Amino acid sequence: MGARHRGRERAVQALYEWAVTGRRLDTTFERFWRVRDESDDVRRFAERLVRGVADSAEHIDRLIDHQAVNWRLDRFSNVDRSILRIAIWEMLNEPDTPSAVVIDEAIELGKKFSGPAAGPFINGILDGVRKRLAEEPATAEMEHTNEAGDG
């Protein structure tokens, strides 16, 4: 298993722990890594994903909300929400990773951590977000920039 795949798995777990416990992110990582033996590459990638999601959560959540017609984000399981957030952050910030790879990885994570029914749900949300970003990259980036400037 590659370091990036393993990093995504660990990122899902760390985001879940962070969401459930409400601890500071640094405290979450300290406790999280204490009981897991991973390579430096896995740790760095997982932390980059989690910190990226934490820093961009409002923007990412708006993209999910736009796509999840008739579903409120708070109705998603913490696991599904974490997987979606990680994948969208990657689509926005990791241009060297094709969106199709990001979506496939997210589907696999959903099957592993959430169950077989998560795959089509995750695929539907992420494919819609991917299409929106491809059609309106300037608009999506402008929304993100305006959000950052308003804080």
Image (cartoon, grey):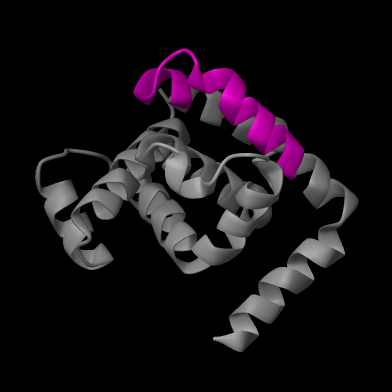
The magenta segment: 110-129
In front: 125, or 47? Answer: 125
| 109 left or right, relative to 132 | left
Name the spot of residue 90 as percent of width and height, x first: 59, 48
Identified at 27% across, 54% down, the residue is 18
| 78 left or right, relative to 144 | left
| 73 left or right, relative to 137 | left
Name the magenta segment's main secondary structure: helix
Residue farthest to the right? 135
Image quarter of the C terminus:
bottom right
Identified at 44% across, 48% down, the residue is 74
Q: Is residue 18 above or below residue 84?
A: below
Identified at 89% across, 49% down, the residue is 135
Q: Is residue 104 visible?
A: no
In front: 123, or 30? Answer: 123
In front: 106, or 39? Answer: 106
Q: Is residue 67 visible?
A: yes
